[in-house]
Amino acid sequence: MVSEGDLVHDVGFRAVVHDGVQKSVGLLDALSEAHTIRRLELPVHTMLPVVLRQLLLPVMIDALGAPRTRQEWGERFHRGHFSKDERDCLAHYLGFRYGDRFRLFDAELPFAQVAGLESLNGETKTAAQLVPSVASGNNVPLFSALSEADELLLTPGDAALWLLHVHCWDTASIKTGAAGDPQAKNGKTTGNPTGPLGQLGVVVPTGETLYETLLLNTPILPDGLEPGDRPQWAWDERPAGLGGQSPAGAAWSERPATGLLDLLTFQARRIRLIACETEQGPRVHRAIVSAGDRLAQTPEYEPHTAWQHTAKPKKGQPHRRPRRHTSGRAAWQGLGTLLAMTLPVQSDGPYTSLLLRQIGDLQGGRVLPWQYRLGVETSGLEYGTQSAVVENAIGDDLPLPVKALLAQDDWLREALLECVAQADQVARALDGLNNDLRRAAGGDPLPRDKGSRPSAQFLHCLDGTMRRLLVGLRTVDEDDEELLERAQLAWEQSVQIAADREADLLLAAAPPRAVVGRTVKNGDKEFVYRSGKAIGVFRTKLAEILPRAAEERRAKREEATAA
């Protein structure tokens, strides 16, 4: 094969530059020109953490070293681009030092693969097993355009992305037994966990350029990298005493990560891509995916997840475990977790990610401007049937005021969390109104896990309003109490309007008999359900939840009466 799939120069990743134009860049250009790139154009939301962790961040950190102080981090960030010396280091790293290890179709050391990997039965599978949205085996998406019988041809660039995606997000299904794997039995390997990211609710801070995003995702390491910590492509440089199986062979092991670089490039599968020549050039059409290394435990230096802290864990359980995202909820509904800056030592509760804590610390140290336009991308996969299939993909992004991440200054954070709590409380009040109207009409409340609820539509209507609020609060200062109060009033008024609209729709849909209602006995007590009473209870709850909007309406009524 003429092409070796050189990721450094030839295999292009689609990037959007400042003028909005898309262009194809190799790995070296993506790093060297990171200050000119607004974002990478990736096929799915779960791909951003994959590219950052498996390629960009470990190359940058290994080549240039991790910042050891806030000052060093700030100097890099405020420069806004890699210096000439840094670009030379990156070119050397991806050239003379390790350039030959970033070739997708290399005969001896194919990137993130095992050369010559073979299944015990000698069979291969279609490239569709690399892409969760395409039907393959037991994974049968509802709207897949292809069946397992169809041939999927992946360009080298797309194949590289999905190859790394498998290492991070693969399902826990039975894997093909690989020749040379002593733990394979009867042609297969069972008991596989999902990929490391599949066990997290991934949180990625983003900046205005790819360069800023790289720095925002780089932990400050006062003592530098752990001794012997190497990325997967430099496994042969690890001290022998660290143990584990080389990712270049079919054998694998269950082991802890030995440091940040090892964690970021963890090889959770043993894979071989099989390419063919077409008129358009080489295309990956077959693949072998076998069992790979199993991460013994998610370490607390994992940068891309928030945590659930347990004050008194069960024997053998850690105090902190990764928190996963909830399907069907927008990212702003989880602000309580993203903004949990203090570890709840004496109780159970959420604790935000290492990187968001670091950003708050950088802002507190005046290294990062408090008006900086920070973004956060969340992603996750929801698995089903023993985690062997993908049922749903979770992905969202939202603007986040940096000031809210300052641990010792919680005035803005409390205001944001109050807004989120109000939306949640009104949503529950709407569901309560819906249930009361159903009772008044002679029916039963909706079961908790069934039916379409008015709260879902209501929260969806608030999505744009909350994002505008978050953008606006990026510029609010501690002295702007009046501005913050006006913002909260405007929020409550928007919530009131959306809630009234949904309540009116529910009331209009109620049958005439709901006006008369009915009496329900529960033991010795009687409960009367009527549509008029239900809407009255709802309005009272709304006034309690949204006090500013209620006071504003009361003041306007008094003013109109006086006039």
Image (tube, rainbow, N blue to C red):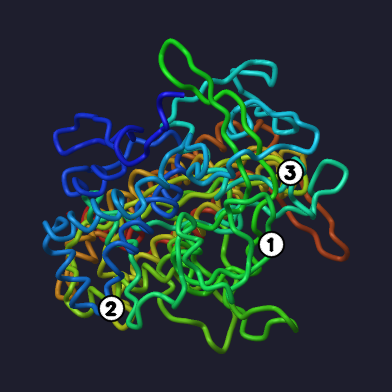
Q: Quadrant of the C terminus?
A: bottom left
Label 3, on which residue? Answer: 178
Query: CB atoms at circles 1 and 3 under 8 Å apart?
Result: no
Q: Of the residues tagged 1 and 2, which is closer to the observer?
A: 1
Which residue is depicted at the point 34% across and 43% down? 464
- Graded by Cα atoms within 10 Å as few (under 14), some (14 to 19) or many (20 or more), the crowding at tag 3 reads many
**For the residue labelled by badge 1, is the local secondary structure a helix, a strand or a loop?**
loop
Q: Mark 1 and mark 2: span between their CA atoms?
A: 32 Å
Whether residue 336 is visible: no
Asked if residue 306 lies left or right of residue 512, the reply is left
Nearer-the-camera pick, 71 or 418? 71
Which residue is depicted at the point 48% across and 34% down? 105
The image shows a total of numbered marks equal to 3
Q: Which amino acid, by three-letter code, is at mark 1? A: Ser
Q: Which amino acid, by three-letter code, is at mark 3? A: Ala
Q: Of the residues tagged 3 and 2, which is closer to the observer?
A: 3
**For the residue labelled by badge 2, is the local secondary structure a helix, a strand or a loop?**
loop
Q: Position of residue 100 (x, y in %)?
A: 39, 45
Location of residue 43 with respect to 171 vertically, above or below? above
- Graded by Cα atoms within 10 Å as few (under 14), some (14 to 19) or many (20 or more), the crowding at tag 1 reads some
Q: Position of residue 488 (x, y in %)?
A: 29, 61
- Graded by Cα atoms within 10 Å as few (under 14), some (14 to 19) or many (20 or more), the crowding at tag 2 reads some
Q: Which quadrant of the figure has residue 8?
A: top left
Query: CB atoms at circles 1 and 2 under 8 Å apart?
Result: no
Label 1, on which residue? Answer: 253
Label 2, on which residue? Answer: 68
Nearer-the-camera pick, 48 or 452? 48
Q: Which amino acid, by three-letter code, is at mark 2? A: Arg
Q: Mark 3 and mark 2: span between their CA atoms?
A: 42 Å
**For the residue labelled by badge 3, is the local secondary structure a helix, a strand or a loop?**
loop
Which residue is depicted at the point 49% across and 17% down? 277
